[in-house]
Image (spheres, rainbow, N blue to C red):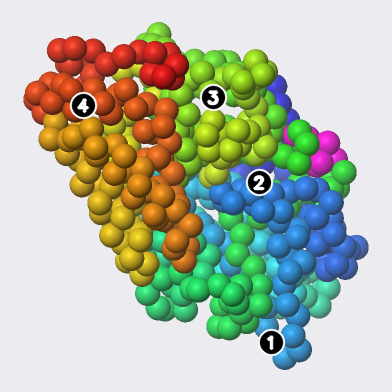
Amino acid sequence: MGRKLLLENINVPGINSFEVYRKHGGYRAVEKALKTMSTEDVVEEVKKSGLRGRGGAGFPTGMKWSFLAKPEGKPRYLVCNADESEPGTFKDRYLMTHIPHLLIEGMIVASYALGAKTSYIYVRGEMMPQIRILERAIAEAKAEGFLGKNILGTGYDLELYVQPGGGAYICGEETALIESLEGKRGNPRIKPPFPAISGLYNCPTVVNNVESIAAVVPIINDGAEEYAKLGIGRSTGTKLISASGNIKNPGVYEIELGVPVEEFIYSDEYCGGMANGKRLKAVVAGGSSVPILPANLILKLTTGENRLMSYESLAEGAFASGTMMGSGGFVVFDEDQCIVRNTWNFSRFYHHESCGQCSPCREGTGWMEKVLHRLEYGHGKLSDLDLLVDVAKKIEGNTICPLGDAAAWPVASAIRHFRDEFEWHVSHAEEAMGRNYGLAHYADPLPKAETIAAN
């Protein structure tokens, strides 16, 4: 069983309270950082740990911190991105619900490292229970002297606030989040300038994901070298994975990076294998925005070696045969699932959530949704497949923020790896139009996963 750094005490009764969290070693990282380390020491420790952003991009966290401008007379801000909205991803909500003080402790240490005196946790607006939990945890920490003026007598001051979001997926993009936090419409900003130079209120700002900030606590407690011993290569430490789909044990798992994907899917420690004895067909490894991969590419690399749960291994082969770790939303499809329907469902989401600021995204996501809809319901043409690929290419790389890419990649990869299934919807239009959603009702079953992957 892999070592757990974030969820080790998740099942301890009352761990969401300050008293119990403190008894189990909570806030030691705050004491260590504020009393024995300089701000530069903390930043350097995070850099040495190799921690990469756990929100999707995977950018080195310590390096991101080191970019923060330090102009005289201007405040600096830390903003926690808790606007978890990626379909298939629910790890941050789980962490905030069950062990909120871990995030609060990480926020204090990170704010100290960055020289921030005011910090914010921007939470998706629909997560009202988590917002109340965090506000209660902040009040407890403040009452115990870990927030407010002169924390632990060190002279460091910090106020921490929870800000409910507007329920828009686009606000997961850091500049759109900043716009929303300032009370404006959550549209992404043109970059440069980047938030590290001009972010919240035009001041230097760092935006980090919930899991990234929580991971700072074990890094400071145990040291960067110990943290870096976990994982594999440049994928150090542990990672929270939201596992869902056609598996026996859906839920949130903390894995040591480098676990074989096959082990993660089939071992009883994690997903427990496929539900109902079905065969694996495909996997979306990092949330709905990453390329989907068929079974033969997600379980084995072209070399015959296991594909690993790491940033590098999942991406091997680029987007021809690879995918991304992304936000850790691991969705498993069995042999009965319709790829066309699932791809259409993803496209509906991205069309709905596009802010409309960039015409390739605003128009392209709508085109993809409509074309996929007619394919799913038996009105499509073979030329629609090339049309979808062409539209995806015209969106990718041509928008202010990555939402356009997130919408294009799933569509392009689904057609690349499951073209036979899309063609089936054209050649069997009557069945596609009259079926009752589940593939068990198809008069002429779809080709099996291995047949599709081989083509």
Amino acid found under the numbered disc labelled 2: Val
Res 122 seen here: no
Location of mark 3 (residue): 298
- Mark 3 closeness class: few <14, some 14–19, many ≥20 residues within 10 Å: many
Q: Secondary structure at mark 1?
A: loop
Mark 4 vs mark 1, foreground winner is 4
Left or right: 195 as drawn, with respect to 187:
right
Position in image of residue 406 (x %, y %): 44, 49
Q: Dots 2 and 1: beta carbons under 8 Å?
A: no
Q: What's the residue at 36%, 33% (across, down)? A: 415
Alpha carbon separation for disc pair 2 and 1: 38 Å
Q: What's the residue at 53%, 45% (across, down)? A: 327
The quadrant of the picture occupied by the C terminus is top left
Q: Which range of residues does the magenta coloring cover?
A: 226-231
Location of mark 2 (residue): 20
Location of mark 4 (residue): 425
- Mark 1 closeness class: few <14, some 14–19, many ≥20 residues within 10 Å: few
Location of mark 1 (residue): 74
Q: Hey, which quadrant is residue 128 in on the image? A: bottom left
